[in-house]
Amino acid sequence: MSVKERKERERAERERLIVATARKLAEQQGWDAVTTRRLAERIEYSQPVLYSHFRGKREIIGAVALEGAAELATAVRSAASRASSPRERVAALARAYLDFAERNPAVYDALFQLDGGLAYAQEDTPEPLKDAFAALLECLAEVADDGVDPGMFTEVFWAALHGLATLTRAGRLLPEDAEPRVELLVDRLAKA
């Protein structure tokens, strides 16, 4: 391995460490606790080293969001692949999405609530974000009513899931009604 290759590998490892540490700190204490000073202390590098990877917290949030988007896409596809009918796939997708939001609140915030400097629904949208939407679309396109644009149907279904995730997390919805809500959403929107 050349010196250049070793330095590139070390740089990539430092970047992964920064993102993982930011994510862990955000999940434990919230995004307000994620500062470059705290990150530098936790990873035992100087703040200038952090700034050589990310210009600031916004870019770190964006990196966490991209990592989370890939994980969300995997979770949705995995859940949907185990179902045997269109209706079961949609219900599995909904449960996987809501479970992801519940288990990863800081990552979910990085994806959908905070400014990570990422373009959404644009030509220059990063591939992990496009793929997360594609994971939803793959499953939902088959249950969109005739004459309904599958992309728009996916957006509306996704918006409903996001609302459920956000309102449940904020304590605005009773947690014991989570499953009946999923069933209602699937039955009313995804006529499968």
Image (tube, rainbow, N blue to C red):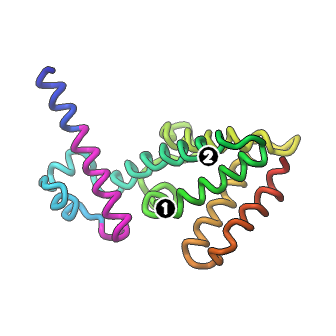
The residue wearing badge 1 is 103
Give left or right: position of 117 versus 152. left
Q: Which residues are magenta?
A: 12-33
Q: Earlier in the sequence, mark 1 or mark 2?
A: 2
In the rendered structure, which amino acid carries the disc numbered 2?
A: Ala
Q: Nearer the viewer, residue 57 or 66?
A: 66
Residue 30: name its quadrant: bottom left
Taking the spot 72% from the left edge, 49% from the top edge, the residue there is: 90
Q: Amino acid at mark 1?
A: Arg
Image spot of residue 111 (x, y percent): 49, 55
Number of other residues with Cα within 10 Å of mark 2, as a class: few under 14, some 14 to 19, many 20 or more: some
> Which residue position holds label 2?
79
Query: Does residue 19 lie above or below 98 as drawn?
Result: above
Give the SS element for disc 1: helix
What is the number of the mark on residue 44?
none
Q: Main secondary structure of the magenta part?
A: helix
Report x, y in % for residue 60. Answer: 33, 53
The quarter holding residue 121 reads top right
